[in-house]
Amino acid sequence: MPGYEILEYKYLKPYKEDGVEPNEIKIGILDFLREIRNYPDGISPRSSFLVVGIEEVLYMTKTEDRLPVAREIHKILQSAAKILFQKLIQVQIVCKGRIVKGDSLWLEYRGENLPIEYIFGSTTTNNVRGSCVYTTGYNLSS
């Protein structure tokens, strides 16, 4: 099923010898959001993106503003679902912090718990050669 793969850097090659192969196009989260919001027709079919920096965006946001920012990111990603699906785009969201799945999904980064479940909704946990990868469809669950 096409969608977002969310994982920690430590699970990517070359950091882990038998790790997950990183996607081709490395792009920051803000640039990725801008592309899918303003220029979705310019995205080549079958592109594969490695999106970085989501933890920095949330960390640098005031604590009281994190939830609204996470919801806005969710809204932008969800609005691009149809075009990403039709163009067979692959997207990895790679995080520097530790991803924790309990009752909800969050990211431990610099001593803070960052609310990534509000962005990606419900995820499925997959074990890829000993690497924990969380997946969700492009439509994202609300």
Image (cartoon, helix red, strand yellow):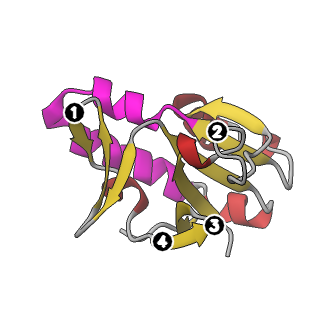
- Cα distance in 3D space between marks 4 and 3: 10 Å
The 10 Å Cα crowd at callout 4, few under 14, some 14 to 19, many 20 or more, is: some
User: Where residue 33 sits: x, y (%)?
Assistant: 56, 38
Give left or right: position of 29 versus 25.
left
The 10 Å Cα crowd at callout 1, few under 14, some 14 to 19, many 20 or more, is: few
Quadrant of the image containing the C terminus: bottom left
Report the span colored magenta. 52-79
Earlier in the chain: of badge 4 and badge 2, it is 2
Badge 3 vs badge 1, beta-carbon distance below 8 Å: no
- Cα distance in 3D space between marks 4 and 2: 20 Å
Q: Secondary structure at mark 4?
A: strand
Q: Residue at x 75, y 46 (%)?
A: 23
The 10 Å Cα crowd at callout 3, few under 14, some 14 to 19, many 20 or more, is: few
The 10 Å Cα crowd at callout 2, few under 14, some 14 to 19, many 20 or more, is: few
Q: Which residue, given by chain and number where applicable, does mark 1 sit on?
A: 111
Badge 4 vs badge 1, beta-carbon distance below 8 Å: no
Between label 4 and label 2, give the one nearer the viewer.
Answer: 2
Q: Secondary structure at mark 1?
A: loop
Residue type, label 2: Tyr
Q: Residue at x 55, y 41 (%)?
A: 9
Between label 4 and label 3, give the one nearer the viewer.
Answer: 3
Residue type, label 3: Val
Residue 2 or residue 16, whichever sits in front: 16
- Cα distance in 3D space between marks 3 and 2: 15 Å
Earlier in the chain: of badge 3 and badge 2, it is 2
Residue type, label 1: Gly
Q: Which residue, given by chain and number where applicable, does mark 3 sit on?
A: 128
- Cα distance in 3D space between marks 4 and 1: 24 Å
Earlier in the chain: of badge 1 and badge 2, it is 2
Q: Is residue 92 above or below residue 101?
A: above
